[in-house]
Amino acid sequence: MSRLLAQILDLLAGDVQADRTVPPTGFTARLTIFTAAAMALLAVFALAFSLSTGRLAERWSEELARTATLRISAPPEQMAAQRRAALELLATTPGIAEARALDAEETQALLTPWFGPDLPLEQLPIPQLIEIVEDRPGYDATGLRARLQAEVPGAVLDDHTRWREPLVAAAARLRLLGWLAMALIGGAMAAMITLAAQSALSANAQVIRVLRLIGARDAYIARAFVRRFTLRALWGAASGTTLGAAILLVLPGGAADAGFLGGFGLAGGQWLWLLPIPPLAAAVAFTATRAAARRTLERQS
């Protein structure tokens, strides 16, 4: 990798005479710049998707890990007694910072997204829910379940483990999908730049023959093409990355009620991940153009 970067930096010095073998404008120039810009823009969004998904899943997982729910199902005449017993038991359990019984309005708010606002709670056997907030060391869930079974038979403890594990697994898959998308973007850019380089080499076949007649080596000719296409990809990718960063900046902020879109984007030091995109695009262009130039020049010899 260091050798490849050294070769790319060496190309930036350039050779004015060799550069004249490659037309500075035309279809191939526009295609290379547009391809690099478009792929860099997509790479910014793929990177933001991957990082945002991981950040959102971590936040949700942390929130679920700090809380638990106690559900009490009992006949109406026993509900108040079991609620008091459960709250007293939780208050004496090490590792629990707070335990609070949800009132009818809070229960209604929880059920409204599923059953609508007109759910008649007073006519339905809705369980009593108790919100548990654990302390930093945490509590012994197995021991707590045993105590609840003995003292509050109608209580069921949900420590949100079944919700956290699928969330973490889904986040890992989505992050992998984001990195896979970036790899595909790099491959597509390499293919497009290869086609553009081959087109430019074929269009300048007569110029290449004249250069060979006056003693120019294939390495000298290939170097001119590689440098021009590498620079085009670098400037195009820089433009696409800048545009992508500007779009991310104008997206909605990470408000708590903004949903997934509110958390989409980059935060803090994650913006530094955008800096390698233009150099990586230039490296892809350098590798693809050098291979295409060698193959095309060998066929034309």
Image: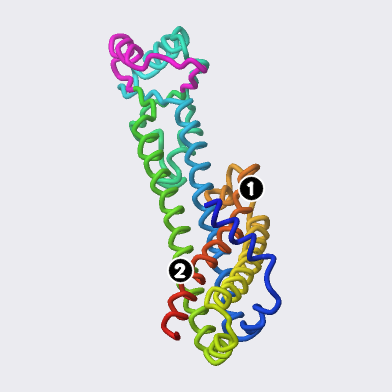
Residue where numbered disc 1 is placed: 272
x and y, in percent, of residue 178 in the image: 46, 53
Q: Are marks 2 and 1 in contact (CB under 8 Å)?
A: no
Q: Please report the residue visible at 52 percent of the width from the left and 16 percent of the height from the top.
A: 97
Of residues 163 and 172, which is closer to you in this image? Answer: 172
Residue type, numbered disc 1? Leu
Q: Which residues are magenta?
A: 132-156
x and y, in percent, of residue 263 in the image: 57, 47
Q: Is residue 114 left or right of residue 4?
A: left
The reply to whether residue 123 is visible in this rendering is no
Element at label 1: helix
Residue type, numbered disc 2? Ala
Looking at the image, is mark 2 or mark 1 earlier in the sequence?
2
263 above or below 4? above
Residue where numbered disc 2 is placed: 188
Q: Quadrant of the C terminus?
A: bottom left
Q: Please report the residue visible at 53 percent of the width from the left and 53 percent of the height from the top.
A: 47
Q: Is residue 11 magenta?
A: no
Task: Give the quadrant of residue 111.
Answer: top left
x and y, in percent, of residue 289 in the image: 51, 72
Task: Give the quadrant of residue 241.
Answer: bottom right
**Crowdedness near tag 1: few (<14), some (14–19) or many (≥20) residues, C-alpha within 10 Å:** few
Number of callouts in the render?
Answer: 2
